[in-house]
Amino acid sequence: MNIQPRSLAATLFPIGLLIIAMTSIQSGASLAKTMFPVVGAQGTTALRLVFASIIMLLLLRPWRVRMSTAALRSVVIYGLALGGMNLLFYMAVRTVPLGIAVALEFTGPLAVALLASRRVMDFLWIGLAVIGLLLLIPIGQSDHAIDPTGAAYALGAGVCWALYILYGQRAGSEHGIQTAALGVLVAALFVAPIGIAHAGSALLTPALLPVALGVAILSTALPYSLEMIALTKMPARTFGTLMSIEPVIAALSGLLFLGEVLTIAQWLAILAIITASVGATLSMRREAPAAVAAD
């Protein structure tokens, strides 16, 4: 009699962790956007990654791991992709609503999923993704058209996300979560000079540092930990399917915390991209390692 409730709890537990992780990431993004007037997107990215790298280095102590030259090369590329993804995403949300930026960025992992499966059905998912993009990317003049530069930044973040997945899987296959700590360190070293050049001494504003620490915890340390736990308790395909709802969580976060109201067409576009992502994930021919997302 007790077996079924335990089974249900075991199923719902990792799902709950993943939803909390995605909510944490997007809440952190909303909080990060409040820092833009002081240090800009570049400075915000630098502070987030520096604080996150310190937290993860202290918790995971990755210096104990010995890596081959090939593994270290993958970690460096993984870290550069992570830094580029974070920087371009924050550059995008300066002018693009959070939910739309995440939906555009999601084309990166969607492309990775579609390349892994070449069935006829995949053309349906490609078509849905294209419809979503056409509804989101501004064509012509419209009161609701989004900033084209911001959209380009979001798509660039998607390219970096795809590289992050590919090289994260290679680098993490041997050393697990320690790879994430090293990747965040590389990302911090890559982005910090850009943030310093842009914001200068404003990065040391005392009132800003607690906010930056909160962003680092909400956007990196907490969700990474929760997602790693969830990954050990669910198939990679299920993980990928659930991750597809992140644009909706981002849109709701933008609405609640930033007052970003989307049009019906924009919500339909997000739904189309989510459906394409779910379909592509479910049609993959075999299980593949899932990669943690890090906006």
Image: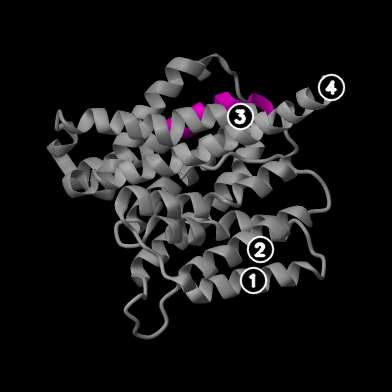
Q: Is residue 76 above or below residue 108?
A: above
Q: Within 10 Å of the Cα at label 2, are there few (<14), some (14-19), or many (20+) other Cα atoms?
A: many
Q: Which residue is mark 2?
A: 276
Task: Kindly state the secondary structure of the residue where label 4 is placed.
Answer: helix
CB contact under 8 Å: marks 3 and 1: no
Q: Nearer the viewer, residue 66 or 203?
A: 203
In 3D space, how far apart are the residues under numbered discs 1 and 4 (Cα atoms)? 41 Å
* The residue stretch that appears in magenta: 174-186
Q: Which residue is mark 3?
A: 228
Which sits earlier in the primary sequence, circle 1 or circle 4?
4
Which sits earlier in the primary sequence, circle 2 or circle 4?
4
In 3D space, how far apart are the residues under numbered discs 1 and 2 (Cα atoms)? 6 Å
In 3D space, how far apart are the residues under numbered discs 3 and 1 (Cα atoms)? 30 Å
Q: Which residue is mark 1?
A: 128
Q: Within 10 Å of the Cα at label 4, are there few (<14), some (14-19), or many (20+) other Cα atoms?
A: few
Q: Is residue 230 above or below residue 30?
A: above
Count all numbered tags in the image, as a single digit.
4
Q: Within 10 Å of the Cα at label 1, are there few (<14), some (14-19), or many (20+) other Cα atoms?
A: many
Q: Which residue is mark 4?
A: 3
Horizontal placement of 150 versus 292: left or right?
Answer: left
Q: Is residue 18 above or below residue 102?
A: above
Q: Quadrant of residue 47?
A: top left
Q: Within 10 Å of the Cα at label 3, are there few (<14), some (14-19), or many (20+) other Cα atoms?
A: some
Task: Kindly state the secondary structure of the residue where label 1 is placed.
Answer: helix
Q: Quadrant of residue 251?
A: bottom left
Residue in the image at 31% along x and 28% along y: 213
Which sits earlier in the primary sequence, circle 1 or circle 2?
1
Residue in the image at 73% along x and 26% along y: 10
* Amino acid marked by disc 1: Leu
Task: Kindly state the secondary structure of the residue where label 3 is placed.
Answer: helix
